[in-house]
Amino acid sequence: MNDWSALVAQKQDDLLAQLFAWLRIPSISADPVYNQDTLYAAEWLQGTLLKAGVDRCELWPSKGHPVMFAEKIIDPSLPTLLVYGHYDVQPPDPLDLWTTPAFEPQIRDGKIYARGSCDDKGQTFLHVAAFALLQEKGALPCNLKFLIEGEEEIGSAHLGEVIADYKKQLSCDAIVISDTSMLGTDKPSLTVALRGLAYLEVTVKGFNRDLHSGVYGGAVDNPINALCGMIARLKDENGHITIPGFYDKVVVHDDASRATLNNRPSDDKSYAAEIGAKQVYGEKDFTTIERIGIRPCLDVNGIWGGYTGAGAKTVLPAEAHAKISMRLVPYQDYHQVTQLITDYLHKICPPTMQLTVNPHHGGEPVLTNVNGKAYGAAVTAFKTVWGKEPIPSYEGASIPIAALLRRELSPELVFLGFGLDSDAIHSPNEHFRVDHFTKGLETVIQFYQEFGKK
Ligand code: BES
Ligand code: MN
Ligand code: MN
């Protein structure tokens, strides 16, 4: 045990109590009912960082929830690290599936249960705690800036503007984000890629009102049937997306790069079993690792229309709706992909229906620089704390602003994530392992120290 792990162990209870106070604030960015709480979560963080000794800490207004910025400049000649994270969380629904309430954090079986425990308050707090401990010991090895936003879970639509306005104050030598996963608790990894996202809502309208399904049935088309038919045509029997031009910009990995990517422990049976799936599924001729990491995908996230209440009601619905997402890989552009699917949906929409396509948010895919100093510092930190060389990992989810941060602020972007796929983020009973909290904190401290070395 080195001095830092001893200190982390000694401070653990106090740090967890602080994190719990933050987790109790329901900062659900998607729901305006929680706007006051969302603001309060930003203010809580501001107060905590000021108490820990940052030089300044401000809430920058945006067209949505405010952006929290803080900095500690100990020596302008030392390198500066910018920490990005988010204080907003996903809605906790469905509420009745939580064993204990989402905003009443509790430790069970060595895991912290609460909405945001992993995504992303728990992981963002690792940097707050690392700063507080290092500052208390007078041992901060580099300059630190914090950029913690409140709209990640709704697409970070307003953050780009704020970054443009405050670009000078955000100048840094590297960016670190703790908002991703590891391959396993005994399989430390460093995320080197995240997918982008295009999200849209589709409506097909058949009539001016719901109709009696006997009086009219058979004589008119049905919006739900029509929409299902259109959705069914978005992929072929090989799981390949059929939208013309969809794959045009997708990077083709050569055999060597695919072999490297696949050269890590992976087992489809246990992967399926952990989520209660009968078997895995995906694009033909690609492995599960590839389907998540280097291939795009298309999924319906929600579909509705007609009667869904108790019993039976005989009705032809006037309208049908679906929410569709596509995860994108380098170098797909979400504006372009949104246009391609919109055109294709119009092309395949039957003449009986009126179609509307509404794009929601998007996000760019991102790749990190694995040759830079920051990545090297992360590798060393992982080896020190987890005792193994971290595996480079391509993850399937998205952090919409990451590519813009990398382009605008620093090409040195590192994902230092400590979650697990099984942590149930966005789901009921989200949790974060206490040992990942403590080891994550040690890793962050080691990372700062490596990064601060001249
Ligand atoms: N922290 C996640 C992204 C993530 C999760 C990366 C697990 C790697 C492993 C982030 O908060 C998230 O949920 N992103 C959303 C973005 C969307 C709401 C715009 C996503 O990927 O769906
Ligand atoms: Mn997150
Ligand atoms: Mn999330």
Image: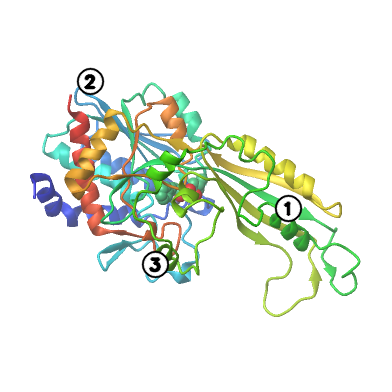
Q: Residue furthest front?
A: 255
Which of the marked residues, 1 or 3, is nearer the chain's N terminus? 3
Q: Could you tell me residue 374's position as x and y percent?
A: 28, 32
What residue is shown at x 8% (from left), y 50% (from top)? Answer: 1
Question: Which residue is label 1 attached to?
Answer: 203
- The verdict on label 1 being within 8 Å of ligand 1 is no
Q: What distance separates the C-alpha of mark 1 from that of mark 3? A: 35 Å
> In the rendered image, which residue does mark 3 sit on?
101
Residue at point 28%, 63% (across, down): 111
| Mark earlier in primary sequence (2, 3) | 2
96 lies above or below 430 = below
Q: CA distance from mark 2 to mark 3?
A: 45 Å
Task: Tell me if 189 is positioned left or right of 349 in this view.
Answer: left
Residue 276 is tagged as none
Left or right: 182 as drawn, with respect to 403: left
Name the residue that disc number 2 marks: 76
